[in-house]
Image (spheres, coloured by chain):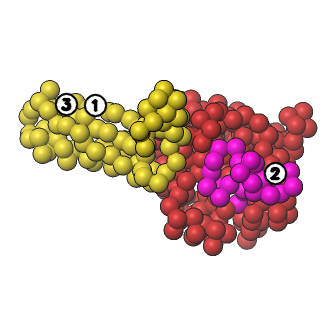
Chain colours: A yellow, B red
Amino acid sequence: MTRFRCAIHIVPRRGILDPQGKAVADALHSLGFADLSDVRVGRHVIVETEAATADAARARITAMCEKLLANPVTEDFEIASVEHA
Amino acid sequence: MKAGIVRFPGSNCDEDAYHAIADHLGQEAVYLWHKDHDLQNVDLVILPGGFSYGDYLRAGAIARFSPIMREVIAFAKRGGPVLGICNGFQIACEAGLLPGALLRNASLRFVSAPAHLRVESIATRYTSQYHLNQVISIPVAHGDGRYTADADTLARLEGEGQVVFRYVNGDGEATAAANPNGSLRNIAGIVSAEGNVLGMMPHPERALDTTLGSTDGVPLFASILESMLAEVKA
C-alpha cells in the first residue's frame, strides 16, 4: 500500500447563485480588475489515504466526494491531483 | 404522544423543542443522543435547530451520518413523522428525507428576525390547525437558509402541494423583499411526498408565547397532536 495525498476542488454548480463569489467579484471590480467575468468560491480539501495504486486512491476519493464531501444537488467536485504523500 | 428530540453536538434549540412538547402540549418528550441507536418508541422525531458539528463542511452534512440518523431515516421510511426545524431542515435534506438543499443566505448575512409566512397547505399533519393562506409570524435565525432545488423538483413540489410555508410580506405577497435568504420561490418549508417529513427554516418552537412576540407556532404543534390522537383512535 502507498500513501497518497489527494487534492479536491468542490465548487457551486453552474446556474446556482454563489453570493460569496459575487461579493469577491464585486470587490475585484472595485479594485480595477474590470476584465473578470465570473468568480466562484468553493472549498479545497486535501485527503491523505492509503491505496494500492493511484487509480485506486482516485476511486476511493470519488466515493468520499459522492457520499459526504460534495452535495450533488448544489456542488460539483474535481480531483485536482493524486500524488505520493 | 411521545416525541424524541435528537441532540447533536451543536444543537441549541433542543430545549425549546422539548418545552414545546412537554409544557405546551403536555406530552412526553425525550432527548435522543446522536450516538444512540434506539428511538425509544417515540411517535414523532424532532431534528432541532442549532449548528450540528459546527456546520463544518456544509450545514447538516456531518450530522446526517450520526448513528441515530440511521434509525431516524428508517423511521421516516416507515411513515413516521419527522419535523426538521432550521438545522434540522438542513439535516433532513442532506439525509435525503426531503429534496433540495439549503445554501448560504444570498445576502451573506445571518438573519435573526420575525418573518411573515403564508400557509400554503393545510392538508398536512403539521398545518391542519391553520387556515389556507393564513399569514403568520414566525422568527427565523439562520445563515444558511436559501432553499434550492432543480427545476423539475420545484415543479413537482409546487404541483403536489408540498410547499407548505412561503416567505411573504405583511400583506401576504411573496415578494423578493420579504425573502430573508434568497430561497427559490420564497420557499420557507416543504413536506415530503408522503407527507410525514416537514422541513422548515423558521422556528415555530420560538413562537408559542406572547412574551416571545408571537403565538403563531401553537397551531403547528396542535396540528401534530391532533393527527397523533386521530391515529390512536383509528
Q: Are marks 2 and 3 in contact (CB under 8 Å)?
A: no
Of residues B134 and B152, the one nearer the viewer is B152
Binning the other alpha carbons within 10 Å of mark 2 as few (below 14), some (14 to 19) or many (20 upward) gives some
What residue do we see at 62% from left, 38% from top? B107
Q: Is residue B102 visible?
A: yes
Local secondary structure at mark 1: strand
Q: Amino acid at mark 1?
A: Ile
Q: Which residue is mark 3?
A: A5
Counting from the top left corner in percent of width and height, residue B212 is at: 85, 34
Asked which quadrant contains residue B207, the reply is top right
The subunit carrying tag 3 is A
Residue, disc 1: A46
The chain carrying label 2 is B
Residue B58 against residue B194 in the figure, above or below: above
Q: Earlier in the sequence, mark 3 or mark 1?
A: 3
The location of residue A42, given as percent across then percent down, is: 41, 38
Of the residues shown, which amino acid type is indicated by label 3?
Arg
Q: Are marks 1 and 2 in contact (CB under 8 Å)?
A: no
**Disc 3/disc 1 C-alpha distance (Å):** 7 Å
Look at the picture and state if B217 lies above or below B131.
Answer: above
Residue at image coords 60%, 41%: B105
Q: Which residue is mark 2?
A: B169
Q: Name the secondary structure under disc 2.
A: loop
| Horizontal relation, residue B151 to residue B221: left or right | left
Q: Which residues are magenta?
A: B164-187
Q: Residue at x 52, y 48 (%)?
A: A17
Q: Are marks 3 and 1 in contact (CB under 8 Å)?
A: yes
Secondary element at image label 3: strand
